[in-house]
Amino acid sequence: MTIDRVTTGPATAGTAVGYTVEELARKVGMSARNIRAHQARRLLAPPVRRGRVALYDDTHVRRLEAILTLQRQGFNLVSIEAMLGVRNGDEAPDGLTAMLQRLATERPALTHALTRHGVIGRAPDGTVRTVRPRPLRAALDLHRVRMGTVPALQALSEVLDSVKPLADELVAAVTARMLALAPELGGAGSRPSWSDADRETILLTQGVVNVLTEAFRLAVESQAEAHVAELLENQPGPEPSGDNG
């Protein structure tokens, strides 16, 4: 039975109207599956249940509209999690926090790029914080080869810009191949509940991430040493000083 709009109890403060997930999907222009995926990521609060019916309210509408707006601006879900307070920032040393704050003031375009890629984020009070510490630390470790902080972070941003289209293609191709090799993964009708489907989606997503990450790491490690050594050999040396005595 489909319920168009239902008067509910106080699901959230000041709310008296409920939407089924299908109605909510139509209202915000998003698939019901994506709505449930946002719930699984804790980007969206769960609905209130009235018997066997799950009902959403206008606070869910506003939250989903905010998510869609941020996505249209180029932010990925990791960044959105940080910006909406779902993903906690890494506990960074005071020096790193101060450096990121200076970067936000002095290099706003670079800060925006790193935020868009989900490396850093902003707390509700405007403080810049780390969200994905591993790529940030990898870039900052370049100080060991005398590369400054801003050039290192600029290099990280440019690498992420270059890798993202490739990642989009690889994720789609690898996921499709996994589903072809194990078609039971796509059999939504055999799952007992949507919570099980959400859990399977999360596990499959993590599996794709792990396989691609390790495969890419292996490929890069296999090629990097020879290529870097060749590039360094071809770099022009320092100009002679002309002082022979």
Image (cartoon, grey):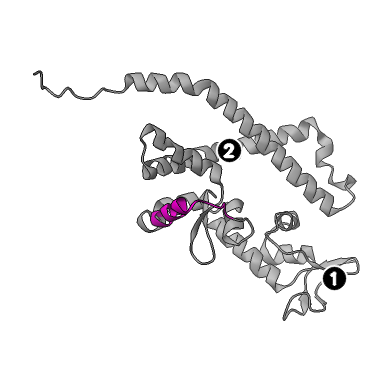
Residue farthest to the left, as pictured: 245
Q: In which quarter of the image is the N terminus?
A: bottom right
Which percent across, then down, holds residue 148? 36, 41
Residue 188, percent from left and from top = 84, 46
Q: In which quarter of the image is residue 13?
A: bottom right
Query: Hey, what amino acid is under mark 1?
Result: Ile
Q: Mark 1: give few (<14), some (14-19) or many (20+) Cα within 10 Å.
A: few
Question: For this rendering, which residue is in front, 162 or 136?
Answer: 136
- Label 2, secondary structure: give it: helix
Above or below, 67 against 217 in this view is: below
Residue at the location (42% across, 39% down)? Answer: 155
Of labels 2 and 1, earlier in sequence is: 1
| Residue drawn where x is 63% and y is 30% of the image | 214
Residue at the spot x=57%, y=25% of the render? 219
- Looking at the rendered structure, which numbered label has been put on residue 3? 1
Residues drawn in magenta = 89-103
* Vertical relation: 165 (above or below) 61: above
Asked which quadrant contains residue 112, the reply is bottom left
Please identify the dominant SS of the magenta region: helix
Left or right: 187, with 85 as reference point: right
- The answer to whether residue 198 is magenta is no
Residue 209 is situated, as x and y percent measured from the top left of the image, at 66, 38
Going by the image, does 181 lie left or right of 141? right
Q: Is residue 88 above or below residue 157?
A: below
Numbered tag placed on residue 111 in the rendering: none
Circle 2 packing at 10 Å, graded few (<14), some (14-19), many (20+), is some
Q: Which mark is residue 167?
A: 2
Alpha carbon separation for disc pair 2 and 1? 40 Å
Tally the marks: 2
Q: In this view, does 187 lie to the left or right of 29?
A: right
Amino acid on which disc 2 is placed = Ala
